[in-house]
Image: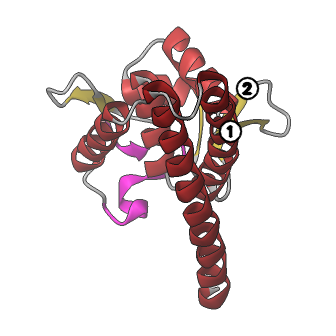
Amino acid sequence: MTSRTEDTGTGSGVETGTAAGSGVDAAGSGGRDEDAVSRFVERFAADMTEAGMQRMASRVFAALLADDDGSMTSAELGERLRISPAAVSGAINYLTQVSMVGRERDPGSRRDRYRLHDEVWYDSFANRDQVLTRWERTLRDGARTLGEDTPAGARLLETAEFFAFVQSELVGVLARWRESRKATG
């Protein structure tokens, strides 16, 4: 288990001795600098928060992303990030709701383990595709309701056309990604 927790000055704890989640000694993880890993987790979480994700959900997601297994228990997440069980629970509920993380049980254990979904980024963007399609439909209906020749209706129509464009580009991007993954194995 972890020998001690250090404060990096960012309000986040850094485990020393083992890599959280994997139970592997830091030397078994290529001798990683756990302080640097913690700084990465906090930096990426801040980027995600700035983009609109909840702060704790961002931190939990970034910690899972940085874990070799992509999987941790609530206790491991709480220890790694120095957050309460309630904060872990709220973050996991959000991440589960948006299909970025799944919940599973270790055989013979009553503890839940939280795991990143395979292809988490692909799935996130594919789900955005569905959202964009719904928004486009609603905006077109709104433009018709307001009158496409009114300033508000024209604004809604332009927004709908933008979402239609982004959605059509996203479909192509996702298809090209799948093809590139098949080609590289």
> At 47% across and 22% down in the image, what residue appears?
78
Q: Using a 10 Å C-alpha cutoff, classify the residue at mark 1 as few (fewer than 14 neighbours), some (14 to 19) or many (20 or more).
A: some
Residue sitting farthest toward the right: 108
Up/down of 159 relative to 84, above or below: below
Report the residue marked by disc 1. Answer: 99
Question: Is residue 14 part of the magenta span, yes or no?
Answer: no
> At 65% across and 50% down in the image, what residue appears?
129
The numbered mark, 1 or 2, whose residue comes first in the sequence reads 1
Disc 1 is placed on an element classified as: loop
Q: Which residues are magenta?
A: 15-31
- Give the camera-side residue of 5 and 161: 161
Whether residue 44 is visible: yes
Up/down of 79 relative to 108, above or below: above
Give the position of the C terminus as an image quadrant.
Answer: bottom right
Residue sitting farthest toward the left: 9
Whether residue 20 is visible: no
The percent coordinates of residue 121 (x first, y second) are 56, 55
Amino acid type of the residue that numbered disc 1 sits on in the rendered structure: Ser
The percent coordinates of residue 12 (x first, y second) are 28, 26
The percent coordinates of residue 123 (x first, y second) are 66, 53
Answer with the quarter of the image where residue 174 lies: bottom right
Report the residue marked by disc 2. Answer: 111
Q: Using a 10 Å C-alpha cutoff, classify the residue at mark 2 as few (fewer than 14 neighbours), some (14 to 19) or many (20 or more).
A: few
- What is the image's colouring? secondary structure
Answer with the quarter of the image where residue 133 lies: top right
Q: Is residue 46 left or right of residue 104?
A: left
